[in-house]
Amino acid sequence: MKLNKKIYKEFKTYPEKVLQFGEGNFLRAFVDWQIDKMNEEAGFNGSVVVVQPQEGGLVNMLNEQDGLFTLYLQGVQGKRAIKTHKIINSISRGINPYTDYNEYLKVAENPELRFIVSNTTEAGIAFDENDKLNEGCQKSFPGKLTAFLFRRFMVFNGDNSKGFIIIPCELIDRNGEKLKEIVLRYAEMWNLGQDFVNWINDANTFCCSLVDRIVPGYPRDTIDEVREELGYDDNLVDVGEIFHLWVIEGPQSIKDELPIEKAGLNVKVVDDMTPYRTRKVRILNGPHTAMVPVAYLYGLETVGEAVDHEVIGRYVHDVIYDEIIETLDLPHEELVEFADAIIERFQNPYVKHYLMSIALNSLSKYKTRDLPSLTEYLKRKGTLPKKLVFSLASLIEFYKGKRGDEDIELADDEDILELFKELWEKYDGTKEGLNKIVTSVLAYEKNWGSNLNEIPNLADEVSRYLEIIEKVGMKEAIKEVI
C-alpha cells in the first residue's frame, strides 16, 4: 500500500503560493516542512509547486504519491532523545520542465503565486551562455527562472503587484544578490527590454538567506523497519534533525506574509545575515566538507562514525577548534559554544548521515566552506593550517575514484570529473606526477575563481600530503597531522 491521498484521510488541497526549484531531501525536510507547519498552525493556506532542476529527478515519484511524504525528525533536545514523524502535505505537484516546459511556464500565470525558493547546490546559481529563451527548457536554474519571470511579466503586463519574494537556499555567499545578478544578465543577453529590467528591480525582492538543518535523507539502512512502523510504502521517506534555522536577509514585511512567528519557527528576518552565515558555513559546513574525503578513505561511512572515532574524531575536533575558530572574529566563548553544539548535532544517535550523501560537488564546496578558513589562517598566523591542507590533499585522492579495490561513485559537474579522470589516468607513479596533478587542480580557476598555486607553499604541502596518502594509505597518512 503506497502513500497517497487515498490512504491519507487528512489530505488537504491548498492554493499554490510557492514555486520551489529542487525536489531533494533538504528542501522537503526544511522548506516544505515549514510550509506544512504554517498551514496547520498559522493559517498560511498555501502549497508548493516543485520544479525539477535537472533532467533526472524525483518529481514522477512525488506525483505518484500526490506530493505526500513522511518526514522523521530525530535528535537531542534539552538533553532528551526525541524522535517524531508525520506526513507532510504541503506539495501540490511536481513538474519536470525538460518534458513539460509549457506546464512549467503556465505556473507563472497563477496570480496567487508569491514566493520562489530554491536549492540547486552551490554549483546551481551559475550563468550558462548557451541558454536560450525560446528553444525549450534552459539548462541552468537562473536561466529557467528568468524565462519564468519574463512569462509572469508578460502575462500581467508588468504589474508591480505580481512580483515575487525570492529566497534561494544555495550555500553560496550573498546567494540572492548573485541570483539576481545572473537573471539581469540573461535579461540583457536575451534583449528582454528595459521595462522587464525595471520590473525585476521594482516588483521582486531577492533575499539572501542562510539555511541550517542536517538532513541525511532516505533511511536506506532501516527502511524495512520504517515501512513496518508506518504501515505503508513511502519511496520518499525523509529524515532530518530537529534543529532548524533559516536566516533571511530582507524587509520585515516578509513576516506579514509568512506567519513564521505564529508557527513557532526558528526563522530570523534580519538586515544583515553576514555574522550568522560566516559562523555557520565555517563551523558546521566547513568540517563536514573537510571530513568527507579523510573519513571515507579511512574506511568510515557516516558523520556519526567519524566524530565518534578515536582518530578521525580527533581530526575533526582539531579542524574546528584549532584551525577554523582561529579565523573568526566573534567572541571566542560564543564560537566554542556554537562548535560544541555542532559536535552534538554530528553525534545525533538517530541520524545516519552518510559521508557520500554530502560528497556532491565537493570541490566547489571546499571553495566556499573551507578555503576562506585556510587563507584567513595563513593571513593571521603566517603558516598554513595543516589539517585543512591535508583535507584538500585527501579530496584530490578521493577524486581518484578508488577506496582500495572499491570504486567511489563520484558526483560532480562533468568538467570536474573529466579533469580528475584525465589527470589520474596520466599519473605515472612519480612524485613529479603527483605534483602535476596538484598544481593542475589548484590552477583550475573555473572552480576556485583564482589560481591557488599563488598561495605560498600550498602546492608543496598538498603534494607532500598526497604523496604520503598514496604511499601508505589514509590510516597511516593521517598520523602526519594529528
Image: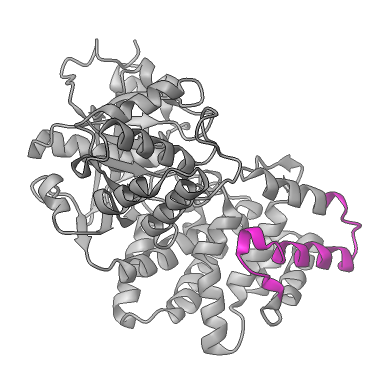
Residue at the image point whose x is 20% and y is 54% from the top: 266
Is residue 450 one of those drawn in magenta?
A: yes
Q: Residue at x 72, y 66 (%)?
A: 443
The N terminus - image quarter: top left
Q: Nearer the viewer, residue 384 or 322?
A: 384
**Quadrant, the C terminus:** bottom right
In the image, is 413 to the left or to the right of 215? Answer: right
Give the x, y percent position of residue 247: 27, 58
* Color style of the picture: one colour
Q: Position of residue 180 (x, y in %)?
A: 39, 53
Residue 116, placed above or below residue 392: above
* Camera-nearest residue between 252 and 460: 252
Q: Quadrant of residue 50?
A: top left
Q: Is residue 87 left or right of residue 137?
A: left
Between 154 and 267, the one nearer to me in the picture = 154
Is residue 415 placed above or below 286 in the rendered structure?
Answer: above
Looking at the image, how many numbered discs can be counted on the residues?
Answer: 0
Q: Is residue 342 visible?
A: yes
Say if the magenta span includes residue 325: no
Residue 425 coordinates in the image, percent (x, y)? 85, 49
User: Looking at the picture, how far across and down is residue 422, in whole percent?
Assistant: 81, 49
Which residue is drawn at the image coordinates 48% and 52% (left, top)? 185
Residue 123 vs 130, above or below: the answer is: below
- The answer to whether any part of residue 236 appears in the image is no
Name the main secondary structure of what is drawn in magenta.
Answer: helix
The magenta span reads 424-453
Q: Quadrant of residue 10?
A: top left
